Image (spheres, rainbow, N blue to C red):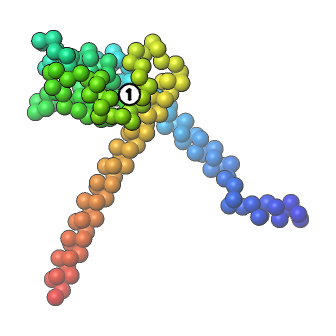
Amino acid sequence: MRNWKKFTDNIGKQPCMKEEAAHDAHSRNILFENLTSSKSDLLFYGHRKATFKNWCFDKDNYQCSSDALAKAGFYFTGSRYEPAAATCAFCYKEMIFEENDDPWLEHRSHSKTCNFVELNKREEKDWTVNDFMFLLSGRIAAEQRSKMKQFIENYDEASAEIEAMTAKALHSLK
């Protein structure tokens, strides 16, 4: 009876092993999905560099070359309307570049919390397994922050619409 009392007294005070196991499995699943997705290819220089086909600043040997951008962690996300746009593969910071920008210095000044900037190892051959996991976890966190930011923006828009509809409905009742 004493053990039963100890057991019932601790219900809700300690995490359930099933919940911990489910959380761990979910975390491993997210990690595995990120490791095997085509997006994870962008963690590597060669894949980032390949996205810069006909980069607008490669023709005249400008400082902001596709090579410099890829080494600084960026891949091409430009368009016909914004041809000089690139996004960091690690923190998802999109930037618009000018021909004389130094991509690494620009990245460091605008993305102080980026794990790639923080690690400060641009050469993949210098990465340890821990470094790679640090970069991958930073990328996952950045992706989740981006999704949450979008969710909040959508929520705010929907909330504003509901408030406007409510005000209109109340006004029509007068």
State the residue at coordinates (48%, 18%). 127
Residue 147 left/right relative to 96: right
- Identify the image quadrant of residue 44: top left
Figure quadrant of the C terminus: bottom left
Count how many numbered circles sit on residues in the image.
1
Figure quadrant of the N terminus: bottom right
- Horizontal and vertical percent position of residue 80: 11, 30
- Can you see residue 123? yes
- Identify the image quadrant of residue 71: top left
Residue 83 left/right relative to 12: left
Residue 124 left/right relative to 52: right
Q: Amino acid at mark 1?
A: Val
State the residue at coordinates (16%, 20%). 100
- Horizontal and vertical percent position of residue 133: 50, 27
Q: Is residue 147 above or below residue 83?
A: below
- Can you see residue 50? no
State the residue at coordinates (67%, 52%). 16
Q: How many C-alpha atoms fall within 10 Å of the one at disc 1: few (<14), some, or many (≥20)?
A: many
What secondary structure is marked by label 1? helix
Furthest-right residue in view?
A: 1
Residue named by callout 1: 117
Q: Is residue 7 above or below residue 38?
A: below
State the residue at coordinates (21%, 82%). 170
Residue 105 left/right relative to 122: left
- Identify the image quadrant of residue 9: bottom right
Q: Is residue 170 above or below residue 80?
A: below
- Horizontal and vertical percent position of residue 158: 27, 62
Q: Is residue 158 above or below residue 169?
A: above
- Horizontal and vertical percent position of residue 138: 44, 34
